[in-house]
Amino acid sequence: MVRIAAINYLNTIPFIYGLETCMAPGSVALHFCTPSESAKMLREDRADVGIMPVGAIADLADPHIVGDYCIGATGPVASVIVVSGRPIGEVGEIRLDIDSRTSVLLTRYLCREKWGIDPQFVPFDFSAQPLDPSQCYLLIGDKAMRNAARFPYVYDLAEEWIALKHLPFVFAAWIANKPLDPAFITSFNQALAYGVSHLAEAVAMDDHQFPRDYACKYLQENISFPLDREKRAGLTEFWRVALEKLTPREWV
């Protein structure tokens, strides 16, 4: 049985639906978690494959991209944003959602290279403290979509990256921490493809607490699932510019 770390966000619903619908009974065990927990499970070998923030791939000794799908964006992503009570150029502190290292790294890079600011970065526990609309936060996932309208300034990180680099962005990809059986990879990829091609059914089956039309529109218009050549080029560029302490690798 292959152990799968599966992030439980709105943007992963098609993947979960495909895996639960198409994989043979007993062939996989799904463990639902946050992005940071997914990375930890793969690092500690408590999972064999998971949807992993691409900024955490370097933690694995032997990472392998599995499948032809990802959580990516070719325009505004809506679910990875910096929100603020003042213009970004006036911000001195950003409170970070630490569930995804990719988003933290992207925020730091945009601060330096696009917005020209050098703020303090402060980890923030969203479960313990309420949001203050006068402050600045990095929000990801469902938290971002639920709270964006409360702030006068909203900066979509995918949109900011694309304007700067003219490349799409990959936030998370399916990563294995060891070589997997090619037959499993084929079945796994077919299951992901099924889920992506049945978005409405996936939304209808999941208890996601968003209006159904809103959820479908978000998955169709804000998330780009295929891990194609352009997204791999964007991933390679992100590794080059955001992970300064690492030897960049090319995901081709």
Image: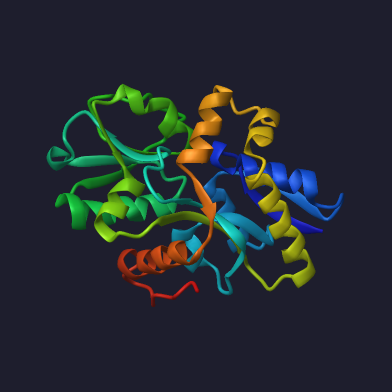
Q: In the rendered image, which quarter is residue 249 located in?
A: bottom left
Residue at 45% across, 49% down: 100
Task: Give the answer, above or below, for where 245 lies relative to 207.
Answer: below
State the image coordinates of residue 234 (x, y, percent, origin top left): 39, 63
**Residue 250 % position (x, y):** 44, 75
Q: Is residue 58 left or right of residue 108?
A: right
Q: Relative to 162, is 54 on the left or the right? A: right
| Percent position of residue 88, x then y | 18, 40
Which residue corresponds to the image point at 69% horizontal and 34% vertical from the top-left? 201
Query: Can the viewer see residue 38 in this picture?
Result: yes
Q: Quadrant of residue 156?
A: top left
**Residue appearing at x 58%, y 24% in the figure:** 212
Residue drawn at x 70%, y 41% as measured from the top left: 17
Is residue 126 among what the camera can see?
Answer: no
Say which of 48 and 76 sits in front. 76
- Say whether residue 116 is left or right of residue 161: left
In this view, 74 is above or below 44: above
Is the residue 24 above or below the residue 77 in the image?
A: below
